Each structure stands twice: as structure tokens, then as C-alpha cells.
Image (spheres, rainbow, N blue to C red):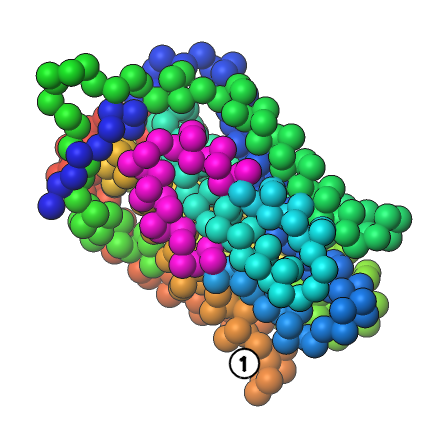
């Protein structure tokens, strides 16, 4: 059943917004994504201090981290739906304020229960931020830049994670663990105020329709799954991120066990791989925009190419003994493996109605987690217990082969699906 939608949802805002203002919005939205992941990851670096001060078990420490993911998983879709209906800009400001204030309360917590409650609200605030933030950015940049913008935006998740751990560790060392949370909260709150002042709904979202005019109609939610190609993109993207999730989780342990690196050094080297992943997102996205400017159906073919390059490099890497050649090949594999984020995010946007783009991005993110980022570390650990970690990592390219096979369904259907949905504008400009 179709629903009424406010007229503040538009797919052509980019045609009336100055480029300079669009980049200001991008910088602020990206900065808040950094805050999102800094606030999420800072906890991990103060685990030893919390354990000593509050006498917590490892299970309790894990729950403080996991409760954020639980809140995100449960609330991302419904809160994205609310943002599409109520207004994306106002929703983003409220989300950022919630997680920043909750992070501040973490720094004031007096025990496990209060910390657990505060961490839950960190997850509530962060649940839909990435999907709604990306929907805003897709509406203010030309379609031919969508892959670049998507990749660059999601690179912030990787950079924010590293910054949260790194800066949190510095603050905890010099000022105590509470200041780690206070510092992240201060950054988030300051940027939230700046966002509220500079990013105005009236400049991005058109004024409501005049009285007596016909209201816009929100497309039904089934339009999120209405074409074979968009379903193949949801699943194929998730399967590829199985590799990324597994490598990010297990590389520090691999470096420790097979390179005899102390854990601090292994963590530092692993951070380099995180930055390689972050670099792959915008750079491969920009390449997709350039190569596919006049033929959007190439984007899904290019995504398959990125996956196959990743699989080939990773398979080759584990034919080498531990050493610099192996590390370089793994880094390149992670670079290209993350490169699918821009093209696949763009294709989801092209194949779903603009009025529910926040919800579409939440669906895409959910599939990435369900098929990839969540099972990747777990399944790899399961295989490592039986085969050894090195042999478990050698099997990761199989997930990429499966991802490429699923996306090939989209290769056959993508152009036809765009035409069937009346997306001639996307054919000309994406």
C-alpha cells in the first residue's frame, strides 16, 4: 500500500545546490561519520582499564561492545524509514546528538550497568546515521559522481575506527579512561552544533507542497526488492564483504602468530591495512564513475572485476611464505575488495525510488552485515580452530567467487531493470 510522503524528498537537489555548499555538507556529514565510529570503537582501547577498575569479566566487556551492534542491527531499518518520512537533516542532527551525549555519559558512568545503558544509546544514535547520511549526499551530488561519493563517505568508517582507538589510547594514557569518552563526545557535540547551524533542510529539501496540490506518494517498501539485479547486488556485496570483515578481524592475530610480531606492533601494521581498505573505497569508486559515465551497466561488471582482482591477489598472497611480498599482496587485495562499495551503493540508489533512499541504503547495509561483516570473522575463526588460521585465510577467495557469481545475475538484468523502472535519467548520467 502506497503511503503519503512529504515533499521534502527529492532526487534532483544537486541541480539547485551550489557545488561549494554541497562539499561543505559532505565534509560535515563525513566528519560526523568519523565521530560515529570513534565513539563506537574508543571502548575497545580502554578494556584493560575498565576490567581492572570495575573487576569486569571478559563477557561483560564484550557485552559493552556488542550492545552497540545489537542496537544498530535492530534499529537501522526502522529509523531510516522514519528519517525518509520525517526529514533527513533533522534526523541526522538528532542522531548525532544522541550518540554524542551517550558517549559523554559513558565517561561519567560509575559501573557496568550505567555503562551498558549508555552504550545502548550510543547504538541507538548511530543505528541509521550511515544510511540516512548517504541518502542526503546522493541527493546533492550529480549522479555521475555517486560511486565516488559513496566510496569516500564509507571510507570514514575505517578512518574513524582507527582514530577512535588511536586517540582514545592517547587520552586514556595521559588523562585517564574517562577522558577518552569525554574527548570523543566533545568532538561529536561540536560538530553536531555546526551541522545544525550550516546544513539547513530548506536548502536541501524543497518546501512542502502548497495547499490544494496533490501530495507525493511514497513508493511501497516492496520496491526495495522489485528487480532481480538489486537483489543480486544486496547479496553479492555482502558476500564480498565477508572477505573484508574476516581480514580486518584476523590480520592482527595472523601477524602475531606467523610473523612473530608483538601485539602492539601487529595492531599498528594491521592499521595500515585498514587505511588500504579505506583508500580503495573512494579511489575505486572514482574510477567507476569515470569508466562508466556513458554506460552505467558497466558498473556492475566493474564491481565483478574488482572482486576477481581481490580474490586473485589474495590467493596469490597465501602462496608466499610470510614476508613483505605477501603483505603487499594482501594490502592490494583489501584495496580492490573494498572498491565495490561505491559501484554497488550507486546501483542500489539507481534501482530504488529516491523517496526511500535512506531505507534502501539501510537495506544494503543490513545485507552487507548479514552476508559478510558478521559471519566473516566468525566462520573464519571456526575454520581456524580446525585447519589453522593460515589455511582458513586461504579459503577466503571462495567467498569472493560466490559474490562474483551472484553479481553476474545483475550483469544480465541491470540495464533492463533500469529501463523497466523508468530510469532513463540514470542511464544517461550515472
Q: Is residue 91 magenta?
A: yes
Residue extending farthest to the right is 174
At x 54% / y 43%, what residue is drawn?
98
Magenta stretch, main secondary structure, is: helix
**Range covered by the magenta-colored residues:** 71-97
Q: Is residue 106 magenta?
A: no
Give x and y (percent) for residue 86. 32, 34
Give x and y (percent) for residue 404. 37, 58
Q: Which residue is mark 1?
A: 382
Q: Is residue 304 left or right of residue 52?
A: left
Give x and y (percent) for residue 104. 67, 46
Above or below, comparing residue 385 to residue 292 in the picture: below
Q: Nearer the viewer, residue 205 or 258?
A: 205
**SS label for mark 1:** helix
Q: Nearer the viewer, residue 114 or 221?
A: 114
Residue extending farthest to the bottom is 386
Badge 1, how many Cα within 10 Å: few under 14, some, many 20+? few
At x 74% / y 42%, what residue is drawn?
183
Q: Is residue 141 left or right of residue 388?
A: left
Q: Quadrant of residue 292?
A: top left
At x 59% / y 69%, what residue is drawn?
63
Amino acid at each position: 500500500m502506497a503511503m503519503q510522503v512529504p515533499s521534502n524528498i527529492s532526487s534532483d537537489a544537486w541541480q539547485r545546490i551550489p557545488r561549494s555548499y554541497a562539499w561543505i555538507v559532505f565534509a560535515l556529514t563525513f566528519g560526523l561519520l568519523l565521530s560515529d565510529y570513534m565513539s563506537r570503537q574508543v571502548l575497545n582501547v580502554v578494556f584493560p582499564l575498565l576490567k581492572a577498575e570495575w573487576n569486569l569479566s571478559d563477557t561483560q566487556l564484550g557485552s559493552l561492545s556488542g550492545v552497540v551492534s545489537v542496537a544498530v542491527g535492530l534499529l537501522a531499518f526502522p529509523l531510516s524509514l522514519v528519517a525518509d518520512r520525517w526529514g533527513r537533516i533533522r534526523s541526522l542532527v538528532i542522531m548525532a546528538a544522541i550518540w554524542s551525549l551517550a558517549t559523554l555519559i559513558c565517561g561519567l558512568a560509575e559501573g557496568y550497568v550505567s555503562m551498558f545503558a549508555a552504550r545502548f544509546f550510543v547504538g541507538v544514535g548511530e543505528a541509521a546515521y550511515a544510511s540516512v547520511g548517504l541518502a542526503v549526499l546522493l541527493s546533492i551530488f550529480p549522479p555521475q559522481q555517486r560511486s565516488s561519493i559513496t566510496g569516500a563517505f564509507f571510507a570514514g568508517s575505517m578512518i574513524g575506527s582507527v582514530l577512535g582507538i588511536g586517540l582514545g589510547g592517547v587520552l586514556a594514557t595521559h588523562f585517564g579512561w574517562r577522558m577518552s569518552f569525554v574527548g570523543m563526545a566533545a568532538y561529536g557535540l561540536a560538530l553536531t552544533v555546526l551541522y545544525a547551524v550550516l546544513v539547513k533542510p530548506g536548502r536541501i529539501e524543497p518546501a512542502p507542497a502548497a495547499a490544494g496540490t496533490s501530495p507525493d506518494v511514497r513508493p511501497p517498501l516492496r520496491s526495495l526488492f522489485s528487480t532481480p539485479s538489486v537483489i543480486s547486488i544486496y547479496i553479492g556485496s555482502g558476500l564480498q564483504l565477508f572477505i573484508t570483515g574476516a581480514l580486518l578481524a584476523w590480520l592482527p592475530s595472523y601477524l602475531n602468530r606467523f610473523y612473530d610480531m608483538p601485539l602492539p606492533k601487529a595492531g599498528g601494521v594491521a592499521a595500515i591495512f585498514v587505511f588500504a581498505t579505506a583508500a580503495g573505497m573512494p579511489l575505486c569508486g572514482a574510477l567507476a564513475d569515470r569508466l562508466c559515465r556513458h554506460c552505467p551497466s558497466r558498473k556492475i561488471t566493474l564491481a565483478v572485476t574488482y572482486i576477481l582482482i581481490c580474490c586473485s591477489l589474495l590467493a596469490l598472497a597465501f602462496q608466499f611464505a610470510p614476508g613483505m611480498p605477501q603483505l603487499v599482496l594482501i594490502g592490494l587485495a583489501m584495496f580492490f575488495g573494498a572498491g565495490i562499495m561505491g559501484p554497488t551503493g550507486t546501483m542500489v540508489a539507481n534501482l530504488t525510488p529516491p523517496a526511500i533512499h535512506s531505507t534502501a541504503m539501510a537495506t544494503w547495509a543490513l545485507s552487507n552485515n548479514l552476508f559478510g561483516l558478521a559471519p566473516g570473522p566468525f566462520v573464519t575463526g571456526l575454520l581456524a580452530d580446525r585447519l589453522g588460521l593460515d589455511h582458513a585465510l586461504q579459503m577466503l577467495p571462495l567467498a569472493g567467487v560466490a559474490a562474483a557469481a551472484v553479481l553476474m545475475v545483475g550483469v544480465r538484468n541491470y540495464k533492463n531493470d533500469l529501463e523497466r523502472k523508468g530510469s532513463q535519467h540514470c542511464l544517461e548520467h550515472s
